[in-house]
Amino acid sequence: MKRVFDILASAAGLIVFGPVILILAALVRRDSPGPGIFAQERVGRGERTFTCYKLRTMRQGTISAASHDTPVSAVTHLGAALRKWKLDELPQLWNVLKGEMSFVGPRPSLPVQADVIAARRARGVFALRPGITGLAQVHEIDMSQPERLAETDARYLATRSFLGDILLIFQTITGKGRGDRVGTGQT
């Protein structure tokens, strides 16, 4: 049932929000040099890597690192607004449609985040497709806390349900959780 929902909702989302994604990508390009859509390798189900798509929120040339290890100065003015409203995640509807992601699940980590990967591996979390949102996100737990994150992801694995997923999606849409935090350093 979850996969059917993911396919139908992501297809509908791409039809409805496709023009919005294109407009936002053009605005991102206008706001700062570089592509409007950002592609980055992430770790997914079964620890397989896949290309995750997002609207670019950081300046071109920013090092590929976890958000919490990236200085706040790397985020563009428009990028900050996109992150606040979680609009940067809209291109991931394509990842959901392709089956690389789900609407709800653990957020996919970068391949270099060995501590997050090890903690999730130890708890069996890689049995799940990664999600656009998840239990950890609505509880404001990000990848800077790998053990707490993996414990929360494992709790989701053990208790997940279709109605629970709908509730997490609703909580995300209504603003619960702040998303990935960027570091506080300037560079």
Image (cartoon, rainbow, N blue to C red):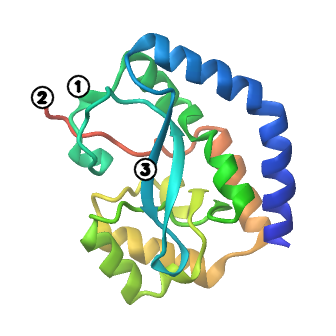
Q: Is residue 161 left or right of residue 126?
A: right
Rendered location of residue 34, percent (x, y): 40, 24
Instruction: Report if residue 133 is visible in the image.
Output: no
Q: Which residue is mark 2?
A: 187
Residue 26 vertical placement versus 17 (above, below): above
Q: Quadrant of the N terminus?
A: bottom right
Q: Nearer the viewer, residue 180 or 13?
A: 13
Residue shown at 68% from the left, 49% from the top:
94
Q: Nearer the viewer, mark 3 or mark 2?
A: 3
In percent of the image, x 57 and y 17: which residue is there?
26
Query: Which residue is disc 1 drawn over?
Result: 73
Residue of label 3: 40
**What's the residue at 64%, 55% (across, down)?**
95
* Crowd rating for badge 3 (residues with CA inside 10 Å; few <14, some 14–19, many 20+): few
Q: CA distance from mark 2 to mark 1?
A: 6 Å
Q: Amino acid at mark 3?
A: Gln
Q: Earlier in the sequence, mark 3 or mark 2?
A: 3
Left or right of residue 99, residue 73 in this image? left
Work out whether residue 58 or residue 68 is closer to the camera in this orientation and state it: 58
Which numbered disc, 2 or 1, marks the residue that appears first in the sequence?
A: 1
Residue 56 screen position, x and y as percent: 45, 32
Q: Residue 180 is drawn in which quadrant?
A: top left
Question: The disc labelled 2 sits on which kind of residue?
Answer: Thr
Q: How many marks?
A: 3
Amino acid, disc 1: Ser
State whether residue 24 is above or below residue 13.
Answer: above
Marks 2 and 1 in Cβ contact (< 8 Å): yes
First reached walking from the N terminus: tag 1 or tag 3: 3
Using the image, tell me which numbered label, if any, was put on residue 160: none
Q: Position of residue 119 (x, y in %)?
A: 33, 79
- Left or right, residue 18 beside residue 65: right
Kindly indicate the quadrant of the structure image that contains residue 58.
top left
